[in-house]
Amino acid sequence: MWIKVRNKESEDRSLFVIFFTVIVTCWLDFVGTDYGLWFYTGKVIPTIPVYFPWDFCILPVFIALLIQYKPHFSPLIKALVFAAVSAFIGEPVFLWLGFYVIVKWNILYSLPIYFFIYLASHKISKRKGFAAF
């Protein structure tokens, strides 16, 4: 979907944001499973972890599309929309599908995490240069 609707002039920025999102979400998933906050019930494809579609596809593309759509709209509102949809629609769907089981976690905890992931991604997408952080 992203390939069809992406802004070709800022494709490098979108790919950088997508890469950042993949790294952060995979790391947070790893930490959550390592601490026993949740666990995954199986694999979508035998050699690929179950969270692959969520961390590598859905979240990064959702962020990239939100950043690209109405770029001058409030990033705080977009972050809230991203966080609410991801926490209150995406996670329950993955629970319902049986992809993962919550052990010591509440979906409400995910809301601020998704909110800050979006804001960090938005900030990265607006950088003028990448030579010095």
Image: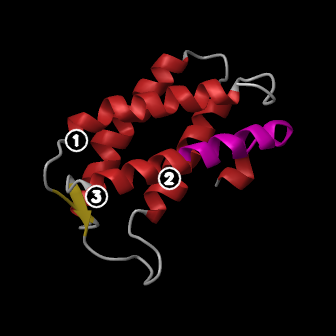
**Where, quadrant-wise, is the C terminus in this rendering?**
top right
Q: Is residue 17 magenta?
A: yes
Seen in the image, is 84 located left or right of residue 41? right
Front residue (pair 65, 110)? 110
Query: What residue is shown with label 3?
Result: 34
- Residue at (68, 30) in percent of width and height: 125
Q: Under tag 2, what secondary structure?
A: helix
The span picked out in magenta is 6-21
Q: Nearer the viewer, mark 2 or mark 3?
A: 3
Q: Alpha-carbon distance for marks 2 and 1?
A: 17 Å
Q: Nearer the viewer, mark 3 or mark 1?
A: 3
Query: What residue is shown with label 1?
Result: 107
Q: Is residue 123 above or below residue 46?
A: above
Residue 104 percent coordinates (x, y): 13, 49
Kindly tell me whether residue 27 is visible in this rendering: yes
- Residue at (44, 51) in percent of width and height: 27
Say which label, 3 or 1, has the lower sequence index: 3
Kindly tell me whether residue 69 is visible in this rendering: no
